[in-house]
């Protein structure tokens, strides 16, 4: 029996949500930037724990100071990947705000926090205390790179595991 799971990609503008989806679904990365102005849907079937799962990935436009998230997009989600750009500290703090708002708007659902662009770690604006604080609060934190593929499969596998628990 095929399980259907809705998974949302949530984070600030230009953190790499679309690139992570493309890497996971299609297996490649493009340097060409594509702005998402609404929501883009992609599908991928995966196996986990002997179960077949069809994920419908909702790549939701990034929230910034000018554009606010439509929480109705997240309704009915089985889980989400919360994405920040390690090279931009503001996106790390915005991720904390988004998680709190999401919990308030739609309740508690499984998520994994991704600090993206690990291929550029020398440029990261992340201090260890910030990341350790999130882990201490029970967050699953993974480092990813849509460009190199580092951690992408592991991120979706971790979220799948949490959704099936």
Image (spheres, rainbow, N blue to C red):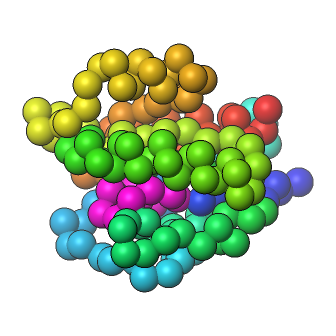
Is 3 left, or right, of 104 in this rendering?
A: right
Is 82 left, or right, of 91 in this rendering?
A: right
Can residue 115 be seen at all in this image of the molecule?
yes
Image position of 38 with respect to 57: above or below: below
Residue 143 picture location, percent across and down: 36, 34
Residue at 36 percent of width and 25 percent of height: 130
Of residues 145 and 127, the one nearer the viewer is: 127
Is residue 149 highlighted in magenta? no
Is residue 15 highlighted in magenta? yes
Q: Residue furthest left?
A: 122
Image position of 71 with respect to 10: above or below: below
Residue at 57 percent of width and 46 percent of height: 99
Where, by quadrant of the figure, is residue 158 drawn?
Answer: top right
Residue 17 picture location, percent across and down: 41, 59
Can residue 27 be seen at all in this image of the molecule?
no
Residue at 41 percent of width and 18 percent of height: 132
Which region shows up in magenta?
Answer: 9-23
Residue 71 picture location, percent across and down: 65, 67
Residue at 74 percent of width and 56 percent of height: 106
Of residues 13 and 8, the one nearer the viewer is: 13
Q: Residue furthest bottom?
A: 37
Residue 135 picture location, percent across and down: 50, 21
Q: Residue furthest right?
A: 1
Q: Which quarter of the rendered picture does the C terminus lie within?
A: top right
- The number of callouts visible is 0
Where, by quadrant of the figure, is residue 109 drawn?
Answer: top right
Where, by quadrant of the figure, is residue 1 drawn?
Answer: bottom right
């Amino acid at each position: 029996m095929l399980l259907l799971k809705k998974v949302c990609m949530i984070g600030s503008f230009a953190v790499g949500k679309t690139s992570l989806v493309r890497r996971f679904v299609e297996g490649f990365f493009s340097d060409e930037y594509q702005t998402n102005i609404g929501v883009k849907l992609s599908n991928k079937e995966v196996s986990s724990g002997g179960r077949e799962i069809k994920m419908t990935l909702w790549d939701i436009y990034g929230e910034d100071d000018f554009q606010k998230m439509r929480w109705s997009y997240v309704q009915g989600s089985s889980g989400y990947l919360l994405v920040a750009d390690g090279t931009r500290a503001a996106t790390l703090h915005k991720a904390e705000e988004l998680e709190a708002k999401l919990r308030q708007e739609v309740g508690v659902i499984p998520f994994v926090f991704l600090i993206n662009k690990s291929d550029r770690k020398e440029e990261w604006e992340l201090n260890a205390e910030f990341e350790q604080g999130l882990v201490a609060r029970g967050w699953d934190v993974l480092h990813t790179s849509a460009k190199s593929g580092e951690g992408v499969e592991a991120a979706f596998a971790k979220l799948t595991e949490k959704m099936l628990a």
